Image: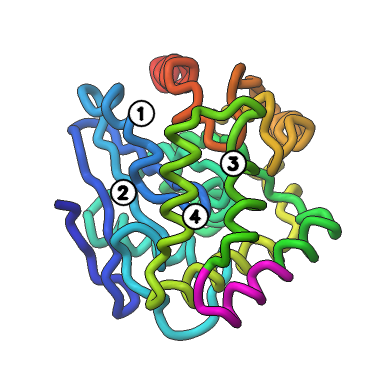
Amino acid sequence: MKPFMEIAGRQMAYLDEGQGQVLLFGHSYLWDSAMWAPQVAALKGQYRCIVPELWGHGDSDRLPDGPCTLTTLARDHLALLDALGIDECVLVGLSIGGMWGVELANMAPARIKGLVLMDSFVGLEPQITCERYLGMLAMIEQLGTIPAPIVEQVAPLFFANQPDAALLAHFTARLAAWPADKIAAMVAVGRSFVTREDRIDWLEEITVPALVMTGCQDKARPVLEGYLMAEVLGCPFKEIPAAGHISSLENPAFVNQALAAFLADR
């Protein structure tokens, strides 16, 4: 059973496993804390792994009142660290987790001691995909559910070209069964990253150890985006073999080894 913390008047669900230096994991849009299960299992013997769930995702509540932006998401995750009495952490963010992670690093630089960005991009969303995603979100909002044609379009975007059939089937079923009372929050969180501001320049200000990794077959966040961020950060870039967007589940052995090496070097 996941614990909950009241943040901004709502219940945020999170995992809290292990002891030691704190690792704060940010999961992908449309996923939940379970996408980090292989990493938590591998690292909780040496580290304290905190894995919050986005509003409207997993067991977390609907959205707090007010607008939803990457800045408000970062603020809410910072509030969770405050509530848990955590002064500093290494942030490991995948996709939107990396986007609000960079906002958090800018908001409270003294709190972030290391940064790992996976399958993410903090520049602008390209116009073609931005318009496509906004159209899908508008339809989902109007229908109050994720219709089958959108599920069929979206689900493969998260995986390599030859996806693990069980992973794909499980994710597809979850999208189709998204709770009606959490659709509005899921749509708002989606819009927050699709319409994000360009934060590439912010990476120049980040001086803590960093690592960027992207699945070699990531359709949503191409490898080139990862290279660009690593270049601006002045940090190593790793291409994750045999993986698409959800690289933490598609090639956990590679990801676990890379994270362990990054953490050991610090």
* Spatial CA span between label 2 and label 1: 22 Å
> Of helix, strand and loop, which one carries label 4?
loop
Sequence order check, earlier mark of 4 and 1 = 4
Sequence order check, earlier mark of 2 and 3 = 2
Identify residue type, mark 1: Gln
Q: Which mark is residue 87?
A: 2
Residue 214 vertical position relative to residue 206 in the rendered view, above or below: above
Q: Which mark is residue 158?
A: 3
* Spatial CA span between label 1 and label 3: 18 Å
Give the label, 2 or 4, closer to the camera. Answer: 4
Image quarter where the C terminus lies is top left
Q: Which residues are magenta?
A: 135-145
Identify residue type, mark 3: Phe
Sequence order check, earlier mark of 2 and 4 = 4
- The residue that mark 4 highlights is 30
Residue 141 vertical position relative to residue 205 in the rendered view, above or below: below
For residue 76, which quarter of the picture? bottom left
Task: Give the prevailing secondary structure in the magenta stretch.
Answer: helix
State left or right for residue 182 relative to residue 130: left
Identify residue type, mark 4: Leu
Residue at 49% across, 21% down: 251
Give the label, 4 or 1, closer to the camera. Answer: 4
State left or right for residue 161 relative to residue 46: right
Give the label, 2 or 1, closer to the camera. Answer: 1
Whether residues under marks 4 and 3 lie with C-beta atoms below 8 angstroms apart, the answer is yes
Residue at 65% across, 75% down: 139
* Spatial CA span between label 4 and label 1: 19 Å
